[in-house]
Image (cartoon, rainbow, N blue to C red):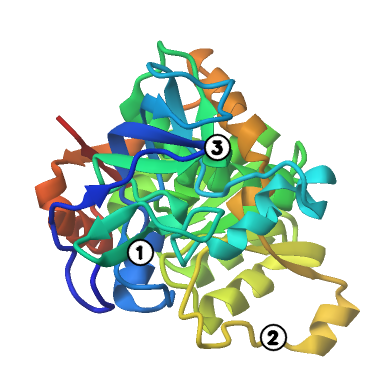
């Protein structure tokens, strides 16, 4: 991505060898996540030019000095959030808030330098990764070793969308057995919020999406109800709870604005929780709520990064559920693409015809 507002460009780049604390990965697959389209559209200001992609899995080809627990040939998933293990957040169990995340949109490695080059020009990698390149050099802090028998095309999704959606319900909303939840937006994150709600034991899981295909998929993945409009979902939430309202509302739409946040706020009960997961234009305020209602009804509005998950634990945890037949990953991949078809893949995402599109490398 050379600049905002332009299509993805397929080019040849130079790639440095891994330095100390780094690894060279040959990616097998990369998910097409909406966050990369926020970079393309300019909603998420970044350092351009940048190599896109932050949801990938592959095989280690080389390691730098000091990397002792990962070796060439190992299968890994990249976490879009690096974890240093030393900062205040990592050391207190909030690895998703690691201070290294400050450099995600610059695309540099932790030492402040770059590994992708085009002549004399440095290029960053989205979330310090750049999984839209068949090979990348990344920090050891960004990779999680996984079992060799897990299909890498499916494992790639667990680097971002899967734990983000799942954790938004399980961790951020603290959903309990018998709860009623409303999920606004059934894309790559929302569909996993549906799975999280099912795992947490929610009695009613209400999915909201204008696209019939996504509503049908939500029901397949565990939703109990699916509606095209927010107003229908809100009405159902109150009817199912005898007028009380939903325990939690999760906002996972592709572009978050004030209207959907208000609808999520309206759907919840006293002391209910509204969890914002999706992103919008970073230069605009997207929360405009009545403070008196917030106070008098004692509601909570919170953000959720990576679903408040711990990358080093939850990536493996969800893959263990998948191996046990308790988590749907295969069914998440609607269509695969070659790298040359990346722009078509994003057109399909914006048209709502995919739960998740995946780039597969030869």
Residue 21 got which mark? 3
Give the number of the disc on residue 289: 2
Q: Does residue 72 lie above or below 139 as drawn?
A: above
Residue 8 placement (x, y as % from top left): 19, 63
State which quarter of the image contains the N terminus.
bottom left
Q: Which mark is residue 210?
A: 1
Residue 270 numbered tag: none
- Give x and y (percent) for residue 107: 44, 60
Taking the spot 50% from the left edge, 26% from the top edge, the residue there is: 327
Front residue (pair 354, 241): 354
Mark-to-mark CA distance, 1 and 3: 46 Å
Residue at horizontal 36%, vertical 36%? 332
Whether residue 93 is visible to the viewer of this picture, yes or no, is: no
Residue 113, position as x, y percentages in the image: 46, 59
Neighbours of disc 1 within 10 Å: few (<14), some (14-19), many (20+): some
Q: Residue at 47% of width from left, 50% of height from top?
A: 189
Closer-to-camera residue (120/145): 120
Asked if residue 241 can be seen in this view, the reply is yes
Please report contact status of discs 2 and 3: CB closer than 8 Å, yes or no: no
Q: CA distance from mark 1 to mark 2?
A: 24 Å
Q: Secondary structure at mark 2?
A: loop
Q: Nearer the viewer, mark 1 or mark 2?
A: 2
């Amino acid at each position: 991505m050379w600049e905002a507002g332009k299509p993805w460009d397929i080019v040849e780049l130079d790639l440095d060898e891994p330095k100390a604390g780094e690894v060279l990965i040959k990616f097998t697959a990369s998910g097409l996540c909406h966050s990369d389209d926020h970079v393309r559209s300019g909603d998420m200001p970044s350092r351009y030019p940048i190599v896109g992609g932050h949801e990938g899995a592959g095989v280690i080809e080389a390691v730098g000095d000091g990397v002792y627990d990962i070796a060439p040939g190992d299968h890994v998933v990249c976490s879009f959030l690096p974890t240093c293990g030393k900062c205040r957040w990592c050391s207190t169990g909030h690895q998703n808030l690691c201070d290294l995340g400050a450099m995600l949109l610059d695309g540099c490695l932790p030492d402040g330098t770059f590994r992708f080059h085009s002549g004399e020009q440095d290029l960053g990698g989205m979330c310090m990764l750049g999984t839209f390149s068949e090979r990348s050099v990344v920090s050891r802090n960004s990779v999680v070793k996984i079992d060799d028998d897990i299909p890498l095309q499916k494992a790639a999704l667990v680097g971002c969308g899967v734990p983000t959606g799942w954790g938004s319900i399980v961790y951020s909303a603290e959903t309990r057995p018998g709860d009623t939840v409303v999920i606004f937006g059934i894309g790559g994150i929302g569909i996993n919020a549906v799975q999280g709600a099912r795992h947490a034991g929610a009695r009613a899981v209400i999915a909201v999406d204008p696209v019939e295909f996504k509503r049908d998929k939500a029901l397949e993945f565990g939703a109990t109800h699916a509606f095209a409009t927010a107003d229908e979902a809100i009405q159902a939430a109150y009817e199912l709870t005898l007028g009380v309202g939903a325990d939690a509302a999760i906002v996972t739409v592709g572009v978050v604005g004030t209207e959907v946040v208000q609808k999520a706020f309206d759907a919840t009960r006293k002391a209910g929780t509204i969890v914002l997961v999706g992103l919008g234009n970073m230069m605009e305020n997207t929360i405009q709520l009545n403070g008196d209602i917030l106070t008098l009804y004692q509601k909570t509005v919170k953000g959720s990064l990576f679903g408040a998950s711990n990358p080093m634990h939850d990536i493996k945890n969800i893959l263990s559920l998948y191996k046990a037949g308790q988590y749907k990953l295969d069914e998440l991949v609607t269509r695969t693409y070659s790298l040359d078809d990346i722009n078509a893949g994003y057109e399909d995402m914006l048209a709502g015809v995919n739960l998740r599109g995946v780039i597969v490398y030869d």
